Structure formats: structure tokens, C-alpha cells
Amino acid sequence: MNTEKLHIIPHQHQIQSKDRNELMGHKGMVIWFVGLSGSGKSTLASELERRLYEQGNHTYILDGDNIRSGLNSDLDFSDQSRVENIRRISEVAKLMVDAGLIVLTAFITPFEEERQKVKNLIGAENYFEIFVNCPIEECEKRDVKGLYAKARAGEISNFTGISSPFEEPINPDLKVPTHQMTVAEGVDLILSQLKDRL
């Protein structure tokens, strides 16, 4: 361990997470959407946020491309950078939960080990994992951003599902098969499972 880190002593402030939750009127938590590119993670997260907002909840979305355009713009798509990408996002999400927000994250999050680290960092009681379960064939048909075509043509390296692995979640809190239901139906399903958690 770097000996300089031994001198870092986090300050204990007067206002705690429970105080912020009380002020917000709901519990802070992370809703983590996992799935292949094109599976519908961002679409579901956006509609879920709209519905939660209309109910008076305080929310924020952390989305893959948005985060990689700023905070994580220095990272590439190697396995090592993917791990660091998720680590940074997890730390940011943890801070936002402490602030009392309902944080919706939409990231491929391809590795089970990293998902478990996220859960451990944030705390199982504050973490709700949704596997946006859509077959790669359907994701390729959608190919909204044209990424699969580029990956197949060799223009994009380390593309999840094509040249980089995606490990399906072992025990997610919920599976949403977006190829078998509408966005509204998916959000209804999520809200029915979240009502007791919030």
C-alpha cells in the first residue's frame, strides 16, 4: 500500500445519508441496467426516470456514452479500461446515493466480477440490478448506432458480444426481455419490483 494513503482520514460530517433520505422523502439507491449494446438499457432508464420524477422522486442517470464523453474520456475499450470505467462510475454512484438520489446507470458492464464489486461497494441494500435481456441477434437488427456493423467490419475492436465477451448476470434482481415487451411494459415491471425498495 502507498504509505501516503495512510494519512487520508475521511471527515465525518454532521448530515448523514439517513438525514438526506428523510429530506428527499425516499431512499437513495442505484438501479443498474446491464446488457448488450442496443438491448434497450438507456431507453428503459430514461423512461423509468421520467416516471420516477413524475412521482416526486429525485433521480439522475449515468449513461455509458455520456460518461465516456467526459469523466472517462481518457479510457479506451480494452478489458482493463472497461474495469476502470465501471470502478469510477461505481464510486460516483455511491456518492450520489449518499446524497439521497435514485441513480439509474446504463452500462454494458460485461464482467460478472465487476458487477459484484459494484454491488459490494454500493451495498446490496442500495443496489438493484436489472439484466436487459435481449439476444445479440435482435440487438444487431436494431443496431441504432451502427456499431455492430462496424465491429463486424473490423472497424471497432473489443466490441462486447463480437470480439469481447459478455458474461450474463448470474443472479440479477430482475430480467427485462426487451425483445418481448414494450418499453412501457418493461418500466411497469421494474416499478412493480421497486416499490418496496424505495
Image (cartoon, rainbow, N blue to C red):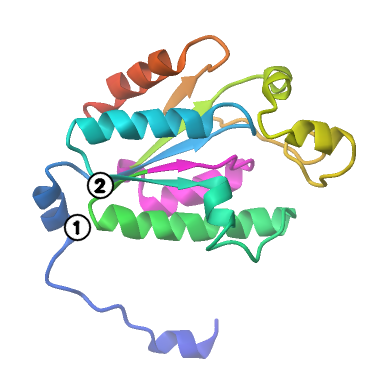
Is the C-beta separation of discs 2 and 1 under 8 Å?
yes
Left or right, 146 with respect to 195, comes to: right
Instruction: Check disc 2 and report the residue beneath it.
Output: 28
Question: For residue 52: magenta?
Answer: no
Q: Amino acid at mark 1?
A: Ser
Q: Residue at x 58, y 13 (%)?
A: 179
Q: Report the magenta stretch's main SS.
A: helix
Left or right, 23 with respect to 46, comes to: left
Work out which quarter of the rendered image holds the N terminus and state it: bottom right
Q: Amino acid at mark 2?
A: Gly
Identify whether 11 is placed above or below 30: below
Q: Residue at x 47, y 50 (%)?
A: 118
Q: Residue at x 54, y 9 (%)?
A: 180
Of callouts 2 and 1, the N-terminal one: 1
Identify whether 59 is placed above or below 83: above
Which of the 4 image quadrants contains residue 46?
top left
Work out which quarter of the rendered image holds the C terminus and state it: top left
Instruction: Check disc 1 and report the residue beneath it.
Output: 17
Q: Position of residue 120 (x, y in %)?
A: 43, 51
Identify whether 44 is placed above or below 72: above
Task: Sort mark 2 into few (<14), some (14-19) or many (20+) by Cα contacts within 10 Å.
Answer: many
Which of the 4 image quadrants contains residue 70?
bottom right
Q: Which residues are magenta?
A: 104-126
Which of the 4 image quadrants contains residue 80?
bottom right
For this orientation, the residue located farthest to the right is: 153
Q: State how far apart marks 2 and 1 are (Cα).
A: 8 Å
Disc assigned to residue 58: none
